[in-house]
Image (tube, rainbow, N blue to C red):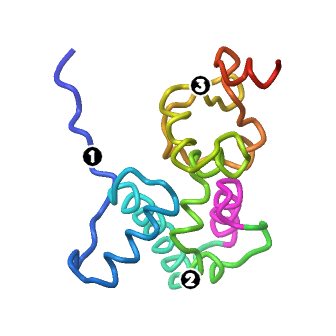
Amino acid sequence: MGDPKKPRKKWEGPAHPWRKDVLMQELEIVGRYGLRNKRELWIAKTILRKIRARARKMLATKEALEAEKAFINRLYHMGLLPSTETTLDDILNLTVEDVLERRLQTIVFRKGLAKSIYHARQLIVHGHIAIGDRRVTSPGHLVTRDEEALIRYYPLSPYAKAKEG
């Protein structure tokens, strides 16, 4: 059986963690999106950093058109781009808010299933939210365009029964 693998770090912290302007900006974003701590924000920033680095690399090396289209299609299906007719320059204009808007917690609140962004987090963690027939308990789950329409209360949840009755 062996030892379990060592979990890899999903985030990279700020280069200068004690700059007041960065601290205030992070605190405002954490409050607006109901994040548990700044680590969740840093995970979103790391995801965005990797996406933008890949776009810059594609621009610099003039990779094949098929690879560029596949990358743009992937970001479209993730919900980060408005259409598949965008360019790599549009990818470079993405912000961390674009990534945070695709989190399950934010989408549950925006769909009106929760009274506040914090209530959305609690509903998800306690297992009251499902995507399709699958219960999801991770508020940081990045929701794709296909999954977005399937978000609802879990069928065995008291919230689903209250909405029916």
Position of residue 29 in the picture relative to residue 14 (left or right): right
Q: Dot 3 corresponds to which residue?
A: 135
Q: Earlier in the sequence, mark 3 or mark 2?
A: 2
From the viewer's perspective, is 146 left or right of 27? right
Helix, strand or loop under label 1: loop
Q: Which residues are magenta?
A: 65-81
Find the residue positioned furthest to the right: 165
Q: Is residue 92 left or right of residue 109?
A: left
Residue at 57% x, 42% y: name it. 120
Question: In the image, residue 39 lies at what x, y percent?
Answer: 33, 56
Type of amino acid under label 2: Leu
Name the secondary structure under disc 2. helix
Of the pair 54 and 22, the residue shown nearer to us: 22
Q: Quadrant of the N terminus?
A: top left
The residue where tag 1 is placed is 8
Circle 3 Cα neighbour tier, 10 Å, few/some/many (<14 / 14–19 / ≥20): some
User: Upstream in the sequence, badge 3 or badge 1?
Assistant: 1
Query: Which quadrant does the C terminus fall into?
Result: top right
Image x and y of residue 21, in percent: 33, 84
Neighbour tally class for label 1: few under 14, some 14-19, many 20 plus, Cα within 10 Å: few
Q: Nearer the viewer, mark 1 or mark 2?
A: 1
Q: Which mark is residue 118?
A: none
